[in-house]
Each structure stands twice: as C-alpha cells, then as structure tokens.
Image (cartoon, rainbow, N blue to C red):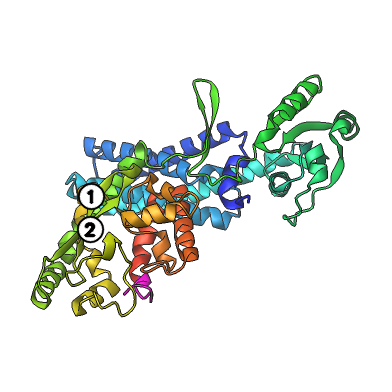
Amino acid sequence: MLDVKQTERSLLQRRNTLSTSLQALLDGLAVLILLLALLFFFNGELTNHYIIMALALLGSMSVIYDRMNIYRHHGTMTKKAFKLLKAWSSAFAFLLLLAFATKHSDTYSRTVIGLLFVFGYFVQVFLHFGFRLLQRHMVSQEANTRALVIGNGALARHLHHRINQNPWMPEEIIGAVLTSDCQENQDKSNAVELPVLGKLEDIKALIKRHEIQTIYIAVSLDSSPMIQQIYFDLLNENVNIHWAPNIFALNLINHSVKELAGIPILTLSETPLIGTHLLLKTIEDRVLSLLMLILVSPIMLVTAILIKLESPGPVFFRQERTGWDGENFRIWKFRSMKLHTEENGEVKQATREDPRITKIGRFIRRTSIDELPQLFNVLAGQMSLVGPRPHALQHNIEYSKQIEAYLARHRIKPGITGLAQIRGFRGETKELEQMEKRVKYDLEYINNWSLWLDISILARTPFSLRSGNAY
C-alpha cells in the first residue's frame, strides 16, 4: 500500500536546486550578520570561540534543515514557520550540547546567545516568507505546461493530486494514459479522480492534441521492458520524460534517491545513523545520559537497597539482547523478580499478577525505574536513549517469523524509550497485532529520525508511564 506521508518526498523530486541553495545561503548569512551585530551592540569581540560556534551552528543548520526538508516544504506559511522553529531549535540544541560537552558554555555571552536564538528565528521566518512571495510571483508569470501520467494506480493518482495541488509547480497533469495492465486492473483505492484520456498506443496523438510537454511514467518495477519501449517511442517527441518507480509496496527503511559516481542510486533500506547524524545522536546520548545518571543516582541507590532488603539475589538483572546491526549485548536492569529458573529455558513475558514479581519489583516496573541502569548501556554505546526497545533473543526469533521486517528494528541502536512506547505500546504484548503495531512505530521512527523527534519522545515519555500494560 502506498504510504503518502513517507513517499511524498521521494516521488516529487523538485527542480529547484538553485532556489534551495539560495535560501540556505540567505539563512546562513542572516545568522552570521545577526551574530556580528549582537557582538558589536553588546561590546563583544569576535573571538575564535565565536567563530567556531558560528561554524558549528551553520553546520548543524545545514544537516538538520536538509533532514527536515525545510527548503522543500510547500505547505501553508504557518506550518512552515512551526517546522522552521523545530529545525532552528534542534540546531541550537546541538550547539548548546556541544558547548556543554567541550566545557566552553561559560565562554559565550548568555545575552548574545539568547537574542541570537530569538531574533535568528524571526529573521529566518521573514526571509522564507519573502522568498515564498517571490516564488509565487515568478510562477504566476509562467504559463502552465501540460503533462500526462502513464498508469492509473495509487502512485499515478498521487502524482496527479500532488502536482496539480501544488501552487509552486508550473505544471498540470491533465490525465492518464492506460497500459494494458492498467486496463485490466485499475486501482480504485484512491478517491482522487484521474481522467483517462486514452491507451498507450494513443499517446503520440494525445501529445499533439493536448500540447503535452511532460510525461510521467508511474508503473510497477516489473514493467522495465515496457518502460524502455515507451522511452524509445517518445525520443523523437518534444517532451520531458520522468519515471516515478512504484517501489512503495515494499516495506522501505529510510529510503532515498541519490547519485553515486554519476549513477542514479535508489536506496531502499539504509540506517539513518551515518555521518553527521551518527555524531549528533552520539553526542545527544552521551551528554544526556550522563546528566540523567547524576540526577537519578539517589533514586537508583534507594532502589538497590530496597531490592537487597526484600529478597535474596543480585540487585541487577542482566540478559542478552540484540543491538545495532544484530550485535548482541548484555542489558542492565534492576532485578524485579524473585530468583527462578525458566521452564525449558523459555523466556516468558511478565503478566498481570505475575507471582515471580516482588513487591518492590511491581512498583519499579510500573514506574520504569527498573530501566534506569540502562543509562550505563547508553554510556557504553550499546544503547541509545531513544530507539526501538530491545526484546529477548527468543522473542526476536519468534516474531521475526511472523512479522514482516521485524528485524529491521536493529538498523539503529535499541533505546530506553521509543515512539512505540509513547504511543501506548509499553509493557506486555499479549496479541500478535500489538507487536505488529509496535514494530510499525519502530520503523516509523527509523524512517523519520531527527534530533527534534528524539527530544520530543524524551519529553513525552514521563506522561506515557500511566500505561496499564506495564506490570
């Protein structure tokens, strides 16, 4: 099934590289000029520390703005302003974390930094609003070109809807041309009407009759011979030809389109934690987990004493779990159960009124205090603060046979909390459907990872502890 939200970015590859670069340049210059003005006004000096800070801020803006599609967002200006606030806040959060981690936070003027954040945001909103008005004026001066889409499935209908509803596209899809496959099995799942103008053999006549300048080919991947034939047939026609491969019936993991050594590469599955993204998440994990350990150390100490007093056995429970890229590690937890031996070595999930759980164990499981020792796993680089929860090895074997793309959860580090947990899938999963939804949210997190998403999940985690599934 076509996932509109996740595939929209890949389907509509914009021909606005110049405008995107110009907007990014204007944002960067505006931030630099504002920083210089603030330093001048408050009698500050442009020291090497501020130069390094400016470079770090511009670098984080470049990565985060690109990741959040700030320059490819064509919704309302209100939504654009809100999205820009999230991106700017994420870039600034990275800057502050970096300053704290390198012990240079006292080097900078808090007044300058605070005003840079506030005025920097409003200056960028003003620039983006002005650029949008300029784009609208330029597009209004262009005559709309006409386009046809070959195909009539969900992808073709989505292309038709998105392009025709986009005021920034100087193009209009006026209808569809059916292939033999489309004629036999038309997809009616999408409510958007796509006028059918004819069959594939009529396409040259349709190009002349309707003065078509662009053709979009939206057919399945197994139609390569037909795509090649269409391409050769239309080479002598004065039309632009674009292929939107329908790859979205697959369960894609962080997909993208890129160029490698001049060859177009369609990435179907890739971990988001590479390069700068990995650096950002590593800094986030190490700095925040250290701070959290300092803050919760009294709670951990009291918990350890209570566990030792209530029942014999170790304070901590350690168990093999699968981590990043399938590497196993030993997870730390406070022991919440009496010492026992699993029947036939089978790992059983905790259930309501489980006799194995101690009194203190019931409390720390309900409040997730039992998970706090995993901050040591985060500091060791085995886990992340946010990510898919690591399951027992036996459960991985069991569910990987029943749930599609289950093991794709391991494309990033497992987390103490995650998107699935704040959506209510915390604790015991009695039914297969519950685990399927948990995996769905885990993959959604991987596909949409950003520093802001991590911060949002961490902020919402305390409110998810009221879930009745944890016991």
**Residue 430 placed where, x, y %?**
42, 69
Disc 1 residue crowd, few under 14, some 14–19, many 20+, Cα 10 Å: some
Circle 1 — which element? Answer: helix
Residue at position x 72%, y 29% in the image = 227
Residue 113 is left or right of residue 151, and the answer is left
- Residue 226: mark: none
Q: Is residue 264 magenta?
A: no
Vertical side of 151 occupied by 456: above or below: below
Of badges 2 and 1, nearer the viewer stands 2
Q: Is residue 303 left or right of residue 411?
A: left
Tag 2: Cα neighbours inside 10 Å, few (<14), some, or many (≥20)? Answer: many
Among numbered discs 2 and 1, the one appearing first in the sequence:
1
Horizontal arrangement in the rendering, residue 194 relative to residue 98 (left or right): right
Q: Which residue is mark 2?
A: 374
Amino acid under label 2? Answer: Gln
Q: Which mark is residue 286?
A: 1
Quarter of the image holding residue 139?
Answer: top right
Observer-nearest residue: 272 or 469?
469
Kindly indicate the quadrant of the structure image that contains residue 291.
Answer: bottom left
Is residue 120 visible in the rendered image? The answer is no
Front-lying residue, 15 or 280: 280
What is the C-alpha distance between the residues marked 2 and 1? 12 Å
Task: Tell me the magenta residue range.
Answer: 463-471
Q: Is residue 467 magenta?
A: yes
In the rendered structure, which amino acid carries the disc numbered 1?
Answer: Arg
Q: Residue at x 26, y 40 (%)?
A: 50
